[in-house]
């Protein structure tokens, strides 16, 4: 079982490696196209600038390799920014969007019309229709000001409520395990999710 973390120059790589180490996994680093061949699973880390991350991915042709990886149904873990980059587009401002990886349908927008300060930095409780034991009613650590605009009726998502508005907090389907929160910073609940990814 080989897990590689994609390095696009702005991810929370140190803490992800540290969390995986706690469950007995030594992760490698993927910086070039040729590195991908060494891994069976990949992680798209969180934190940082979407435009910078996409520029790095395209420069090193890692965007194409990630799409190929997904087409072959290899497991992909996306955390915060990594989840967001997996959608079709990312709204930097009202007048500017960037094209992202398009692994799933949807777009990324800035959180607006909320009385709470941004970015959201807090422990929040997840809700989901299918009552997944490792997600539903569990608390996880969030740090973000953009959200993934997906259909909340989708059976594969969980959400949190902020000022009465539902915001997608995770998406799990087939080979994709995407989390808006940071499992690597979420204590026991987060480590359980990393263990699930390890077992795939």
Image (cartoon, rainbow, N blue to C red):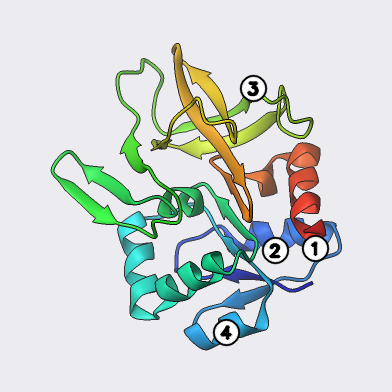
Which of marks 1 and 4 precedes in the sequence? Answer: 1
List the residue tagged with mark 2: 17
List the residue tagged with mark 3: 129
Separation of disc 3 and disc 4 at Cα? 38 Å
Instruction: Tell me residue 26's x, y (percent).
Output: 77, 71
Q: Is residue 55 left or right of residue 183?
A: left
Q: Secondary structure at mark 4?
A: helix
Which of marks 3 and 1 precedes in the sequence? Answer: 1
Q: Which residue is drawn at the image coordinates 74% and 30% (left, top)?
A: 132
Q: Is residue 195 left or right of residue 35?
A: right
Q: Secondary structure at mark 2?
A: helix
Q: Residue furthest left?
A: 95
List the residue tagged with mark 1: 21
Separation of disc 4 and disc 1 at Cα? 20 Å
Which of marks 4 and 3 precedes in the sequence? Answer: 4
Where, quadrant-wise, is the N terminus in this rendering?
bottom right
Q: Which residue is drawn at the image coordinates 34% and 74% (left, top)?
A: 58
Q: Is residue 169 above or below residue 35?
A: above
């Amino acid at each position: 079982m080989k897990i590689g973390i994609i390095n696009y120059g702005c991810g929370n790589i140190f803490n992800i490696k540290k969390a995986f180490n706690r469950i007995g996994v030594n992760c490698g680093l993927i910086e070039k196209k040729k590195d991908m061949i060494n891994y069976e699973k990949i992680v798209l880390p969180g934190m940082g600038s979407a435009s910078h991350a996409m520029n790095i991915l395209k420069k090193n042709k890692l965007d194409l390799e990630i799409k190929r990886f997904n087409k072959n149904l290899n497991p992909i873990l996306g955390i915060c920014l990594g989840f967001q980059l997996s959608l079709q587009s990312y709204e930097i401002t009202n007048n500017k969007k960037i094209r992202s990886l398009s692994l799933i349908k949807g777009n990324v927008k800035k959180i607006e019309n909320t009385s709470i300060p941004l970015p959201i930095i807090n422990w929040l409780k997840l809700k989901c229709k299918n009552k997944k034991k490792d997600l539903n009613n569990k608390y996880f650590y969030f740090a973000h000001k953009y959200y993934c605009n997906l259909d909340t009726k989708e059976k594969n998502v969980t959400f949190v409520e902020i000022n009465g508005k539902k915001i997608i907090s995770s998406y799990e389907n087939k080979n994709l395990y995407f989390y808006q929160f940071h499992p690597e910073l979420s204590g026991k609940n987060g480590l359980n999710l990393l263990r699930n990814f390890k077992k795939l």
